Amino acid sequence: MKVIIIGAGPAGLSCAHELSKSGVETELFEATEFVGGMSRSFDLWGQRVDLGPHRFFSKEKRINHFFAEVLEGEYTTVNRLTRIYYKNRFFQYPLKFSNVLLNLNPFTIIRILWDYLIQRINPIKNPTTFEAWVTNRFGNKLYEIFFKSYSEKLWGIPCSKIDADWAAQRIKTLSLIGAVWSAIKGNAGNKHKTLVDEFSYPKHGTGLLYEKCAQQIQNNGGTIHLNAPVKRVLINESNRTQGIELADGTRVDADFVISTMPLTTLIKGIENVPTEIKNAASQLYFRNTILVYLEVDGIDLFKDNWIYVHSPDVKHGRITNFRNWCPTLYGNKKTSILCLEFWAFEEDDVWSMPDENLAKVAISELEKLKLVPSSMGILNSKVIKIPKCYPVYETGYQKPLKMLENYADCIDQLIPIGRYGSFKYNNQDHSILMGLLAAENILGNNSTNLWEINTDTEYQEEGEIKDILNQ
Ligand SMILES: Cc1cc2nc3c(=O)[nH]c(=O)nc-3n(C[C@H](O)[C@H](O)[C@H](O)COP(=O)(O)OP(=O)(O)OC[C@H]3O[C@@H](n4cnc5c(N)ncnc54)[C@H](O)[C@@H]3O)c2cc1C
């Protein structure tokens, strides 16, 4: 049996790792010169950085086992501090009532409490949009302050058009009773560290996991081709997968094809796709990310691993400070690398803006926020653009997505997985799980419906770190 895998991100690599370990002939084709996909790490100005912040966390035993097995001990524990920056003040994230109340003026607090109580007494039934979902749980005022501007920067569409699915998976709800209870318990209620407080992290960046994984696949006899973009998947008259065609025209046969290339591109590339399926694929779209890295001449900037920037008067939405992850990233360097995230659609001016202009925008926004002392200069800048970063869950997206899922299911031996590969807002852990389960399906040990992964997940971070790592 021979399996072809398209894409060397977490989904493709975890699948290839599992298959090659079981002795299956595995050939992986990656479009770029790197492994790791959006989770790769790279050297920058003598330090190591990721593509924005990459915190690994999961409560799923097999994912944590994969992480520990592949890294062979080369990981550490990072203390987590991530706050929201709004109107020159820091707010804890996930939100805590006590912290919110201490940081705002009395009028705003009364409005927050009033809106929260009204919403608890009279909730919106079956909220289907992000706006309705968040308002239901937090009240209108908290929604306006802490969710609206950030989410609209990220998605580029009004919150009333974002599907509630995204909120349910990503947002920890807020409990007034919980806040009162922790205030009564004080420190006694806070002695166990959870996945909110700390996380495991590969010592040389999140991409180390995937570099080691790629090496182990090759040690197991698998093949990885870099700079080998796949143009399309080949299907025969009986609707069975035959193999792939590369961008240079080369054809390679296989018994199974696992695809982590964008689902929409995969489907549109298949020969004789029905028009309604092509139309459905055209209704799904992605949001791009622009990362602007700045090297700051100093080391004590702010304590957070990353900060969510809610202020509507700046365009970026998040700043990572790699100095606050682990010392193996920066060694003996005496500078800090920050990464500012901007989001854009392809047609937006900012997406085609030259790198030097983007760097100027980033520097001026950083000055505006006053997060970096003016005495510290900016030594270097670098811009990286990531297309198709976020599958946009615009209300109504499920219908065209379901059509693509059903169509792909009718093609034998073709398995789409991954973040843009299955149009699911995956973190690394979800993509790894998809990869491992796809391999199990092929090996005949399982018959999991892979479309179901990361669809019904509720926010879950309360596990204690010691239990998670000892699984
Ligand atoms: C700024 C940012 C912050 C993030 N923060 C976190 C975080 O804190 N925690 C977390 O767990 N996750 C985080 N993520 C998400 C994480 O990066 C992704 O979930 C993960 O990389 C998805 O893995 P994947 O294999 O599904 O897709 P990808 O990583 O996108 O990999 C897909 C691979 O397929 C290749 N490919 C595409 N088309 C073709 C083709 N035609 N032929 C051959 N190869 C092709 C691509 O080049 C790529 O290497 C973040 C992502 C970003 C961008």
Image (cartoon, rainbow, N blue to C red):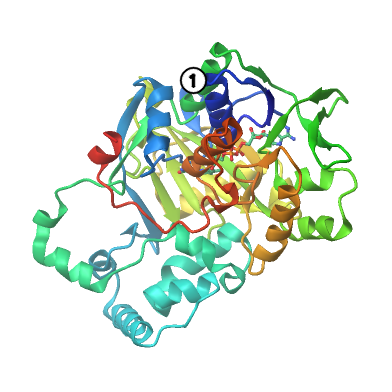
Residue 164, compared with residue 447, is above or below; it is below
- Dot 1: within a 10 Å radius of its alpha carbon, few (fewer than 14), some, or many (20 or more) residues? some
- What is the total number of numbered labels drawn onto the structure image? 1
Q: Is residue 189 left or right of residue 454?
A: left
Residue 330, compared with residue 97, is above or below; it is above
Q: Is residue 405 left or right of residue 294?
A: right
Residue at disc 1, secondary structure: helix
Q: Between 223 and 168, which is closer to the camera in this rendering?
A: 223
Q: Residue at x 41, y 51 (%)?
A: 370
Q: Give amino acid for label 1.
A: Lys
Picture quadrant of residue 257: top right
Which quarter of the figure is the N terminus placed in?
A: top right
How far from the left and from the top, in percent, is residue 9?
A: 59, 33
Residue 320, compared with residue 257, is above or below; it is below
How far from the left and from the top, in percent, is residue 152?
A: 57, 64
How far from the left and from the top, in percent, is residue 158?
A: 60, 70
How far from the left and from the top, in percent, is residue 171?
A: 42, 61
Q: Which residue is mark 1?
A: 212
Picture quadrant of residue 118: bottom left
Q: Between 357 and 158, which is closer to the camera in this rendering?
A: 158
Q: Can you tell me which quadrant of the image ligand 1 is in?
A: top right
Picture quadrant of residue 357: top right
Q: Is residue 82 left or right of residue 417?
A: left
Q: Residue at x 61, y 61 (%)?
A: 393
Q: Residue at x 86, y 25 (%)?
A: 248
